[in-house]
Image: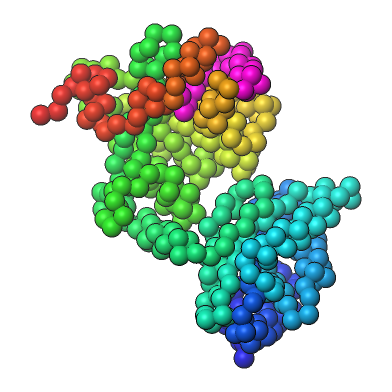
Amino acid sequence: MCSTSDFMTFSPADNDNAAAVSSYCRFLDDASGIVENGGFTIAVFSVNKFAHLCEIYGPSEGKFIKHTVNNTMTAAVRDNELFSPYEIHKFIVLLQGDADAVSERLKSIFDEICVILASDKCHISASFSCGLCTSSSLGINEIINNAEMARKSVDHDSFITQLAVYSEQIRAMDERKKLIELGLGSAVKNNELVIEIQPKYDLKTGKCVSAEALVRWDHPKLGRIAPDEFILLAEQTGDVIDIDMFVLETVCKHMRRWLDMGVNPVPIAVNQSRMHISDPAYADSIFNLMQKYDVWPSMIELETTESVIMNDYKKVSRVLEQLRNYGFVLSMDDFGSGFTSIDMLSELEYDVLKLDQKLIKKIADYPRSYSLVKHLIAMAHEMNMKVVAEGVETAVQAELLKGIDCDLGQGFYYSYPVSVESFDAKIFGIISI
Protein backbone atom coordinates (compact mmCIF):
# COMPACT_ATOMS: atom_id res chain seq x y z
CA MET A 1 0.00 0.00 0.00
CA CYS A 2 1.06 3.58 -0.61
CA SER A 3 1.98 5.86 2.26
CA THR A 4 2.32 9.63 2.27
CA SER A 5 6.10 9.17 2.37
CA ASP A 6 5.89 7.87 -1.20
CA PHE A 7 4.39 11.16 -2.28
CA MET A 8 6.62 14.00 -3.41
CA THR A 9 6.33 17.29 -1.51
CA PHE A 10 3.36 19.58 -2.05
CA SER A 11 3.26 23.19 -0.96
CA PRO A 12 1.53 23.61 2.42
CA ALA A 13 -0.30 26.54 0.84
CA ASP A 14 -1.97 24.25 -1.69
CA ASN A 15 -5.53 23.72 -0.48
CA ASP A 16 -5.80 20.55 -2.54
CA ASN A 17 -2.82 18.96 -0.77
CA ALA A 18 -4.67 16.22 1.10
CA ALA A 19 -6.75 15.26 -1.92
CA ALA A 20 -3.65 15.22 -4.13
CA VAL A 21 -1.77 12.97 -1.71
CA SER A 22 -4.69 10.59 -1.59
CA SER A 23 -5.01 10.62 -5.37
CA TYR A 24 -1.34 9.84 -5.91
CA CYS A 25 -1.42 7.01 -3.37
CA ARG A 26 -4.29 5.42 -5.27
CA PHE A 27 -2.38 5.93 -8.51
CA LEU A 28 0.66 4.05 -7.16
CA ASP A 29 -1.41 1.18 -5.82
CA ASP A 30 -3.46 0.77 -9.00
CA ALA A 31 -0.55 1.33 -11.42
CA SER A 32 1.62 -1.34 -9.75
CA GLY A 33 -0.67 -4.09 -10.96
CA ILE A 34 -1.38 -2.60 -14.39
CA VAL A 35 2.19 -2.09 -15.60
CA GLU A 36 3.14 -5.71 -14.89
CA ASN A 37 0.98 -6.79 -17.81
CA GLY A 38 2.81 -4.50 -20.25
CA GLY A 39 1.40 -2.33 -23.00
CA PHE A 40 1.27 0.82 -20.89
CA THR A 41 3.37 3.99 -20.68
CA ILE A 42 3.77 6.30 -17.71
CA ALA A 43 4.29 10.00 -18.33
CA VAL A 44 5.25 12.72 -15.86
CA PHE A 45 4.60 16.26 -17.06
CA SER A 46 4.82 19.78 -15.66
CA VAL A 47 3.64 23.27 -16.54
CA ASN A 48 6.61 25.26 -17.81
CA LYS A 49 7.54 28.37 -15.83
CA PHE A 50 4.56 27.86 -13.52
CA ALA A 51 5.82 30.26 -10.84
CA HIS A 52 6.39 32.91 -13.51
CA LEU A 53 2.86 32.39 -14.85
CA CYS A 54 1.47 32.85 -11.34
CA GLU A 55 3.42 36.10 -11.01
CA ILE A 56 2.08 37.39 -14.32
CA TYR A 57 -1.53 36.24 -14.09
CA GLY A 58 -2.00 35.89 -10.32
CA PRO A 59 -2.45 32.93 -7.91
CA SER A 60 -6.10 32.38 -8.82
CA GLU A 61 -5.12 31.91 -12.47
CA GLY A 62 -2.37 29.54 -11.34
CA LYS A 63 -4.98 27.44 -9.58
CA PHE A 64 -7.18 27.65 -12.71
CA ILE A 65 -4.29 26.26 -14.80
CA LYS A 66 -4.02 23.25 -12.49
CA HIS A 67 -7.77 22.71 -12.46
CA THR A 68 -7.89 22.89 -16.26
CA VAL A 69 -5.17 20.27 -16.50
CA ASN A 70 -6.94 18.07 -13.96
CA ASN A 71 -10.33 18.32 -15.66
CA THR A 72 -9.00 17.81 -19.21
CA MET A 73 -6.78 14.87 -18.31
CA THR A 74 -9.47 13.21 -16.18
CA ALA A 75 -11.87 13.41 -19.12
CA ALA A 76 -9.21 12.05 -21.52
CA VAL A 77 -8.20 8.88 -19.65
CA ARG A 78 -9.99 5.68 -20.60
CA ASP A 79 -10.90 2.56 -18.68
CA ASN A 80 -7.86 0.95 -17.07
CA GLU A 81 -5.88 4.21 -17.44
CA LEU A 82 -4.86 6.48 -14.56
CA PHE A 83 -4.17 10.13 -13.86
CA SER A 84 -3.12 12.05 -10.75
CA PRO A 85 -1.56 15.34 -9.60
CA TYR A 86 2.16 14.95 -8.79
CA GLU A 87 3.75 17.84 -6.87
CA ILE A 88 2.66 21.49 -7.09
CA HIS A 89 2.63 21.95 -10.88
CA LYS A 90 3.37 18.39 -12.01
CA PHE A 91 1.11 15.52 -12.99
CA ILE A 92 1.41 11.82 -13.73
CA VAL A 93 -0.58 9.69 -16.12
CA LEU A 94 -0.62 6.02 -17.16
CA LEU A 95 -1.90 5.50 -20.69
CA GLN A 96 -2.28 2.43 -22.87
CA GLY A 97 0.22 2.05 -25.72
CA ASP A 98 3.92 2.40 -26.37
CA ALA A 99 5.83 5.64 -25.86
CA ASP A 100 5.38 6.83 -29.46
CA ALA A 101 1.61 6.32 -29.44
CA VAL A 102 1.23 7.89 -26.00
CA SER A 103 3.39 10.85 -27.05
CA GLU A 104 1.09 11.65 -29.95
CA ARG A 105 -1.97 11.31 -27.76
CA LEU A 106 -0.50 13.57 -25.06
CA LYS A 107 0.43 16.22 -27.60
CA SER A 108 -3.21 16.37 -28.62
CA ILE A 109 -4.34 16.65 -24.99
CA PHE A 110 -1.77 19.35 -24.25
CA ASP A 111 -2.97 21.28 -27.29
CA GLU A 112 -6.53 21.05 -25.98
CA ILE A 113 -5.46 22.41 -22.58
CA CYS A 114 -3.53 25.25 -24.19
CA VAL A 115 -6.54 26.24 -26.32
CA ILE A 116 -8.71 26.47 -23.18
CA LEU A 117 -6.09 28.54 -21.33
CA ALA A 118 -5.53 30.86 -24.31
CA SER A 119 -9.24 31.49 -24.86
CA ASP A 120 -10.70 34.99 -24.95
CA LYS A 121 -11.70 34.56 -21.31
CA CYS A 122 -8.27 33.59 -19.96
CA HIS A 123 -5.49 34.73 -22.34
CA ILE A 124 -2.99 32.44 -20.58
CA SER A 125 -0.08 31.17 -22.67
CA ALA A 126 1.14 27.84 -21.30
CA SER A 127 3.35 24.94 -22.37
CA PHE A 128 4.48 21.63 -20.90
CA SER A 129 7.56 19.50 -20.31
CA CYS A 130 6.89 15.77 -20.37
CA GLY A 131 8.91 12.60 -19.81
CA LEU A 132 7.74 9.09 -20.70
CA CYS A 133 8.83 5.56 -19.83
CA THR A 134 7.46 2.18 -20.95
CA SER A 135 8.43 -1.06 -19.20
CA SER A 136 6.91 -4.26 -17.87
CA SER A 137 10.13 -5.47 -16.24
CA LEU A 138 10.64 -2.59 -13.81
CA GLY A 139 8.83 -1.71 -10.63
CA ILE A 140 6.40 1.20 -10.64
CA ASN A 141 8.72 3.52 -8.70
CA GLU A 142 11.61 2.95 -11.10
CA ILE A 143 9.37 3.55 -14.11
CA ILE A 144 8.20 6.83 -12.57
CA ASN A 145 11.79 7.83 -11.75
CA ASN A 146 12.80 7.16 -15.36
CA ALA A 147 9.88 9.21 -16.68
CA GLU A 148 10.83 12.04 -14.33
CA MET A 149 14.45 11.78 -15.52
CA ALA A 150 13.24 12.15 -19.11
CA ARG A 151 11.09 15.16 -18.15
CA LYS A 152 14.09 16.89 -16.57
CA SER A 153 16.09 16.40 -19.77
CA VAL A 154 14.03 18.95 -21.73
CA ASP A 155 14.20 22.74 -21.56
CA HIS A 156 11.77 23.92 -18.88
CA ASP A 157 12.31 27.58 -19.79
CA SER A 158 10.95 26.94 -23.25
CA PHE A 159 7.67 28.42 -24.46
CA ILE A 160 6.82 25.31 -26.47
CA THR A 161 5.68 21.90 -25.27
CA GLN A 162 8.41 19.25 -25.34
CA LEU A 163 8.28 15.50 -24.74
CA ALA A 164 11.19 13.09 -24.15
CA VAL A 165 11.19 9.30 -23.93
CA TYR A 166 13.50 7.72 -21.36
CA SER A 167 16.66 6.14 -22.76
CA GLU A 168 20.08 5.06 -21.56
CA GLN A 169 21.44 8.26 -23.09
CA ILE A 170 19.13 10.27 -20.86
CA ARG A 171 20.29 8.26 -17.84
CA ALA A 172 23.92 8.97 -18.73
CA MET A 173 23.12 12.68 -19.07
CA ASP A 174 21.38 12.62 -15.70
CA GLU A 175 24.35 10.94 -14.02
CA ARG A 176 26.69 13.50 -15.57
CA LYS A 177 24.44 16.31 -14.36
CA LYS A 178 24.50 14.90 -10.82
CA LEU A 179 28.31 14.72 -10.87
CA ILE A 180 28.45 18.33 -12.01
CA GLU A 181 25.96 19.47 -9.37
CA LEU A 182 27.82 17.62 -6.60
CA GLY A 183 31.12 19.25 -7.55
CA LEU A 184 29.89 22.81 -8.00
CA GLY A 185 30.25 23.78 -4.36
CA SER A 186 33.94 22.91 -4.24
CA ALA A 187 34.99 23.94 -7.77
CA VAL A 188 36.27 27.38 -6.73
CA LYS A 189 37.79 26.16 -3.47
CA ASN A 190 39.68 23.35 -5.23
CA ASN A 191 41.04 25.67 -7.96
CA GLU A 192 39.27 23.73 -10.70
CA LEU A 193 38.02 26.79 -12.57
CA VAL A 194 40.04 28.57 -15.24
CA ILE A 195 39.28 31.42 -17.58
CA GLU A 196 39.77 31.75 -21.30
CA ILE A 197 39.61 35.04 -23.16
CA GLN A 198 37.91 35.73 -26.47
CA PRO A 199 38.99 38.95 -28.24
CA LYS A 200 36.54 41.45 -29.74
CA TYR A 201 37.65 43.28 -32.88
CA ASP A 202 36.87 46.74 -34.21
CA LEU A 203 35.16 46.05 -37.53
CA LYS A 204 36.66 49.13 -39.18
CA THR A 205 40.29 48.88 -38.02
CA GLY A 206 40.52 45.11 -37.53
CA LYS A 207 42.23 45.62 -34.18
CA CYS A 208 41.42 43.93 -30.88
CA VAL A 209 39.90 46.65 -28.70
CA SER A 210 38.29 44.56 -25.94
CA ALA A 211 37.66 40.96 -24.91
CA GLU A 212 35.44 38.67 -22.87
CA ALA A 213 36.50 36.38 -20.03
CA LEU A 214 34.81 32.97 -20.18
CA VAL A 215 34.94 30.46 -17.34
CA ARG A 216 35.79 26.79 -17.88
CA TRP A 217 35.73 23.96 -15.36
CA ASP A 218 38.43 21.31 -15.28
CA HIS A 219 36.33 18.68 -13.53
CA PRO A 220 38.42 15.95 -11.83
CA LYS A 221 36.33 13.17 -13.42
CA LEU A 222 34.62 14.71 -16.44
CA GLY A 223 37.47 16.82 -17.79
CA ARG A 224 36.98 20.28 -19.32
CA ILE A 225 33.36 21.47 -19.06
CA ALA A 226 32.02 24.51 -20.92
CA PRO A 227 29.90 27.09 -19.03
CA ASP A 228 26.75 26.23 -20.96
CA GLU A 229 26.70 22.94 -19.08
CA PHE A 230 27.13 24.16 -15.52
CA ILE A 231 26.20 27.84 -15.17
CA LEU A 232 22.44 27.27 -15.18
CA LEU A 233 22.90 24.57 -12.55
CA ALA A 234 25.09 26.95 -10.56
CA GLU A 235 22.31 29.54 -10.65
CA GLN A 236 19.90 26.99 -9.21
CA THR A 237 22.29 25.96 -6.43
CA GLY A 238 23.54 29.49 -5.69
CA ASP A 239 27.15 28.58 -6.54
CA VAL A 240 27.09 31.05 -9.43
CA ILE A 241 27.83 33.85 -6.95
CA ASP A 242 31.24 32.38 -6.09
CA ILE A 243 31.91 31.50 -9.72
CA ASP A 244 31.17 35.02 -10.96
CA MET A 245 33.35 36.56 -8.26
CA PHE A 246 36.16 34.14 -9.12
CA VAL A 247 36.05 35.24 -12.76
CA LEU A 248 35.91 38.92 -11.82
CA GLU A 249 38.80 38.69 -9.38
CA THR A 250 40.89 36.64 -11.81
CA VAL A 251 40.38 39.32 -14.47
CA CYS A 252 41.39 42.00 -11.95
CA LYS A 253 44.59 40.07 -11.16
CA HIS A 254 45.51 39.87 -14.84
CA MET A 255 44.57 43.51 -15.40
CA ARG A 256 46.91 44.46 -12.57
CA ARG A 257 49.65 42.22 -14.01
CA TRP A 258 49.34 43.87 -17.43
CA LEU A 259 49.50 47.34 -15.92
CA ASP A 260 52.55 46.44 -13.84
CA MET A 261 54.28 45.17 -17.01
CA GLY A 262 53.63 48.50 -18.73
CA VAL A 263 51.03 47.02 -21.07
CA ASN A 264 47.99 49.09 -22.01
CA PRO A 265 45.24 46.50 -21.43
CA VAL A 266 41.97 46.32 -23.32
CA PRO A 267 38.68 46.33 -21.38
CA ILE A 268 37.57 42.85 -20.36
CA ALA A 269 33.92 41.81 -20.13
CA VAL A 270 32.71 39.41 -17.45
CA ASN A 271 29.28 37.83 -17.19
CA GLN A 272 27.29 38.56 -14.05
CA SER A 273 24.24 36.53 -13.07
CA ARG A 274 20.81 37.75 -12.06
CA MET A 275 21.60 36.83 -8.45
CA HIS A 276 24.25 39.56 -8.33
CA ILE A 277 22.36 42.28 -10.13
CA SER A 278 19.40 42.01 -7.75
CA ASP A 279 21.66 42.34 -4.66
CA PRO A 280 21.75 45.94 -3.31
CA ALA A 281 25.25 45.37 -1.83
CA TYR A 282 26.68 44.10 -5.10
CA ALA A 283 27.91 47.40 -6.56
CA ASP A 284 29.85 48.32 -3.44
CA SER A 285 31.40 44.86 -3.15
CA ILE A 286 32.85 44.78 -6.66
CA PHE A 287 33.99 48.40 -6.46
CA ASN A 288 35.95 47.40 -3.34
CA LEU A 289 37.47 44.59 -5.40
CA MET A 290 38.61 47.11 -8.01
CA GLN A 291 40.26 49.16 -5.26
CA LYS A 292 41.99 46.07 -3.90
CA TYR A 293 43.80 45.56 -7.22
CA ASP A 294 43.93 49.27 -8.12
CA VAL A 295 42.05 48.66 -11.36
CA TRP A 296 39.80 51.25 -13.01
CA PRO A 297 36.13 50.23 -13.17
CA SER A 298 36.04 51.54 -16.75
CA MET A 299 38.33 48.64 -17.72
CA ILE A 300 35.69 46.12 -16.63
CA GLU A 301 32.59 45.52 -18.73
CA LEU A 302 29.77 43.87 -16.78
CA GLU A 303 27.60 41.72 -19.04
CA THR A 304 24.06 40.86 -17.96
CA THR A 305 21.47 38.91 -19.90
CA GLU A 306 17.96 40.02 -20.79
CA SER A 307 16.49 37.74 -18.13
CA VAL A 308 18.02 39.90 -15.39
CA ILE A 309 15.53 42.65 -16.12
CA MET A 310 12.55 40.34 -15.80
CA ASN A 311 13.23 39.55 -12.11
CA ASP A 312 12.79 42.85 -10.29
CA TYR A 313 12.92 45.83 -12.63
CA LYS A 314 13.08 48.53 -9.94
CA LYS A 315 15.74 46.80 -7.85
CA VAL A 316 17.84 45.97 -10.91
CA SER A 317 17.65 49.53 -12.22
CA ARG A 318 18.95 50.89 -8.90
CA VAL A 319 21.88 48.46 -8.88
CA LEU A 320 22.74 49.24 -12.50
CA GLU A 321 22.65 52.95 -11.74
CA GLN A 322 25.10 52.39 -8.86
CA LEU A 323 27.44 50.49 -11.17
CA ARG A 324 27.34 53.26 -13.77
CA ASN A 325 28.09 55.85 -11.09
CA TYR A 326 31.17 53.85 -10.10
CA GLY A 327 32.32 53.92 -13.73
CA PHE A 328 31.69 50.32 -14.83
CA VAL A 329 30.76 49.69 -18.46
CA LEU A 330 27.37 47.95 -18.69
CA SER A 331 26.59 45.52 -21.48
CA MET A 332 23.29 43.88 -22.40
CA ASP A 333 24.29 40.38 -23.48
CA ASP A 334 22.42 38.05 -25.87
CA PHE A 335 20.02 40.77 -27.01
CA GLY A 336 17.37 39.23 -29.24
CA SER A 337 17.32 35.85 -27.49
CA GLY A 338 14.67 36.74 -24.90
CA PHE A 339 11.92 39.26 -24.37
CA THR A 340 13.39 42.56 -23.22
CA SER A 341 11.35 45.50 -24.42
CA ILE A 342 13.00 48.42 -26.21
CA ASP A 343 11.44 50.68 -23.59
CA MET A 344 13.24 48.87 -20.75
CA LEU A 345 16.50 49.01 -22.65
CA SER A 346 16.26 52.76 -23.08
CA GLU A 347 15.42 53.36 -19.43
CA LEU A 348 18.26 51.22 -18.06
CA GLU A 349 20.90 53.04 -20.13
CA TYR A 350 23.32 50.27 -21.04
CA ASP A 351 26.61 51.27 -22.67
CA VAL A 352 26.94 48.24 -24.95
CA LEU A 353 24.41 46.10 -26.81
CA LYS A 354 25.51 42.58 -27.73
CA LEU A 355 23.42 41.09 -30.51
CA ASP A 356 22.72 37.40 -29.99
CA GLN A 357 24.43 35.01 -32.37
CA LYS A 358 21.04 33.70 -33.56
CA LEU A 359 20.45 37.10 -35.17
CA ILE A 360 23.92 37.22 -36.72
CA LYS A 361 23.72 33.69 -38.12
CA LYS A 362 20.86 34.62 -40.45
CA ILE A 363 21.96 37.98 -41.84
CA ALA A 364 23.70 36.58 -44.92
CA ASP A 365 20.79 34.37 -45.99
CA TYR A 366 17.64 36.20 -44.91
CA PRO A 367 17.04 39.81 -46.05
CA ARG A 368 14.57 40.42 -43.21
CA SER A 369 17.16 39.29 -40.64
CA TYR A 370 19.70 41.62 -42.21
CA SER A 371 17.20 44.48 -42.08
CA LEU A 372 16.37 43.75 -38.44
CA VAL A 373 20.05 43.76 -37.41
CA LYS A 374 20.65 46.95 -39.39
CA HIS A 375 17.84 48.76 -37.60
CA LEU A 376 18.86 47.42 -34.17
CA ILE A 377 22.35 48.81 -34.72
CA ALA A 378 20.95 52.20 -35.78
CA MET A 379 18.65 52.23 -32.76
CA ALA A 380 21.50 51.38 -30.39
CA HIS A 381 23.69 54.13 -31.83
CA GLU A 382 20.88 56.65 -31.33
CA MET A 383 20.86 55.55 -27.68
CA ASN A 384 24.64 56.12 -27.50
CA MET A 385 25.40 52.42 -27.23
CA LYS A 386 28.16 50.54 -28.97
CA VAL A 387 27.10 47.34 -30.69
CA VAL A 388 28.90 43.99 -30.51
CA ALA A 389 27.90 41.19 -32.85
CA GLU A 390 28.59 37.85 -31.20
CA GLY A 391 28.85 34.58 -33.05
CA VAL A 392 30.49 35.99 -36.19
CA GLU A 393 31.71 32.94 -38.08
CA THR A 394 32.24 33.97 -41.72
CA ALA A 395 33.89 36.74 -43.72
CA VAL A 396 30.53 37.45 -45.38
CA GLN A 397 28.91 38.10 -42.00
CA ALA A 398 31.81 40.33 -40.97
CA GLU A 399 31.59 42.42 -44.15
CA LEU A 400 27.83 42.80 -43.89
CA LEU A 401 28.13 43.94 -40.27
CA LYS A 402 30.87 46.38 -41.18
CA GLY A 403 28.67 47.81 -43.93
CA ILE A 404 25.83 48.58 -41.49
CA ASP A 405 28.15 50.25 -38.97
CA CYS A 406 28.34 47.52 -36.34
CA ASP A 407 31.15 48.51 -33.97
CA LEU A 408 32.69 45.23 -32.80
CA GLY A 409 32.73 41.60 -33.83
CA GLN A 410 33.26 38.56 -31.65
CA GLY A 411 33.26 34.97 -32.79
CA PHE A 412 35.17 32.08 -34.32
CA TYR A 413 35.89 34.07 -37.50
CA TYR A 414 38.17 36.33 -35.48
CA SER A 415 39.32 34.07 -32.67
CA TYR A 416 38.25 31.15 -30.56
CA PRO A 417 38.42 31.66 -26.78
CA VAL A 418 42.10 31.17 -25.85
CA SER A 419 44.11 30.68 -22.69
CA VAL A 420 45.37 33.76 -20.88
CA GLU A 421 48.90 32.90 -21.99
CA SER A 422 47.83 32.71 -25.63
CA PHE A 423 45.94 35.99 -25.28
CA ASP A 424 49.07 37.61 -23.83
CA ALA A 425 51.10 36.50 -26.82
CA LYS A 426 48.48 37.20 -29.49
CA ILE A 427 47.34 40.63 -28.34
CA PHE A 428 50.22 42.06 -26.27
CA GLY A 429 53.20 40.13 -27.60
CA ILE A 430 53.96 38.79 -24.10
CA ILE A 431 55.71 35.43 -24.26
CA SER A 432 55.59 33.33 -21.09
CA ILE A 433 58.81 31.55 -20.17
> Which quarter of the figure is the C terminus placed in?
top left
Which residues are drawn in magenta?
A: 366-392
**Image x and y of residue 339, in percent:** 65, 36
| Side of 34 where 221 appears, left or right | left
Horizontally, residue 210 falls left or right of residue 119, namely left
* Image height of 104 relative to 21, above or below: above
User: Where, quadrant-wise, is the N terminus in this rendering?
Assistant: bottom right
Residue at figure coordinates x 31%, y 55% from the top left:
222
Residue at 47% across, 27% down: 390
From the viewer's perspective, is 101 left or right of 267?
right
For image coordinates 81% across by 65% down, the residue present is: 72
Q: Is residue 388 magenta?
A: yes
**Residue 290 appears in the picture as rendered:** no
Q: Which residue lies most toward the bottom here? A: 1
Q: Which residue is drawn at 56% across and 11% down?
A: 404
Along the line of sight, the residue nearer the viewer: 36 or 339: 36
Quarter of image, res 212: top left
Locate residue 227: give its quadrant: top left
Most foreground residue, 302 or 133? 133
